[in-house]
Image (cartoon, helix red, strand yellow):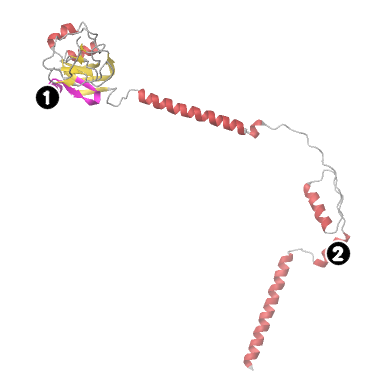
Amino acid sequence: MGIVIVIAVLVLVAFAGLLIVSTLRRRESLGVGELSRETRSRDRKGRKAAALSEGSSGRDVEAAAVLARKGGDLVPVGPAPVTPFVEPDPEEIGVYRRQFLNRSIIGGFILGLSGFGASVLAFLWPSGGGGFGSKIAVGKLADIDLAIQQGNGFAYYPEGRMWITHYPSNALEKARAVYSAPELAGMEAGVIALYQKCVHLGCRVPSCATSQWFECGCHGSQYNRVGEKKAGPAPRGLDRFAMEVGGGSLTVNTGQIIQGPPIGTNTTGQEAEGPHCVSGAGGH
């Protein structure tokens, strides 16, 4: 019996709590100052829509429409006054789509051509950080002389694309009448720096240990040990580089290529000292 009474009390308490919660929620939904349903119904029946004046705002029109749906009268609204046309400011409009596309295309072309031009200039511009196209400190003249002896009369320096050979001192008098000062600077010190490229069609000219000449394997052009043309289709002697000598050291300016001597130049009088490496070479 006692258990039944306890259960009944708990049910009543729960029901009372549920009733209180639902009442509070209903009041919250009405809001502060909210009118009751009956009051709003009586007010709707006696309410009439106020006439809208010409030029009323859109908010007033919407309010009148809502009032009409709730039982009020909708008052027709006259046409609003026409606003005069004002030409827009080009700065506010900005760039048209066609203008944007045209400018983008032109800008792309300019950018591409600029990049191509810069790459071409970078490729053609002589490098100042060493290597071919710049001044190369070859080394001490004593070391160069040793390298020529070890190369059987020829010393090759790949960083400068050049051959360096001895120039005989007894030929200097003739050389001064043919060669320029930048060439004579090294020749008077006993050496000469020659460009490796054949002046005929640009093949790399190797040395020939037996003849002690330079002999081109492409078309048979031949040059003596100091690069003066001896045979073949070459139009002149090997091109050479400007040289500087100071403190017993040789510096070769591979950025200053001097055109080889004309056909017939033979300051040393050197003839082939042995068999030719290129067979079938023509005469002078």
Foreground tag (1 vs 2): 1
In the picture, measured across the screen, residue 151 lies left or right of residue 219, that is left
> Is disc 1 surrounded by few (<14), some (14 to 19) or many (20+) residues within 10 Å?
few
Q: For numbered disc 2, what is the local secondary structure?
A: helix
Q: For numbered disc 1, what is the local secondary structure?
A: helix
Q: Which residue is mark 2?
A: 42
Instruction: Quadrant for residue 241, please give it.
Output: top left
Image coords of residue 122 (percent x, y):
37, 26
First in sequence: mark 1 vs mark 2: 2
Relative height, residue 268 to residue 98 (above, below)? above
**Disc 2 residue type?**
Arg
Q: Are marks 1 and 2 in contact (CB under 8 Å)?
A: no
> Could you tell me if residue 229 is visible in this image?
no
**Disc 1 residue type?**
Gln
The magenta stretch spans which residues? Answer: 139-163
> Could you tell me if residue 44 is visible in this image?
yes
Q: Which residue is mark 1?
A: 150
Q: Residue at x 67, y 77 (%)?
A: 17
Quarter holding the C terminus?
top left
Q: Which sits in the foreground, 89 or 13?
A: 89
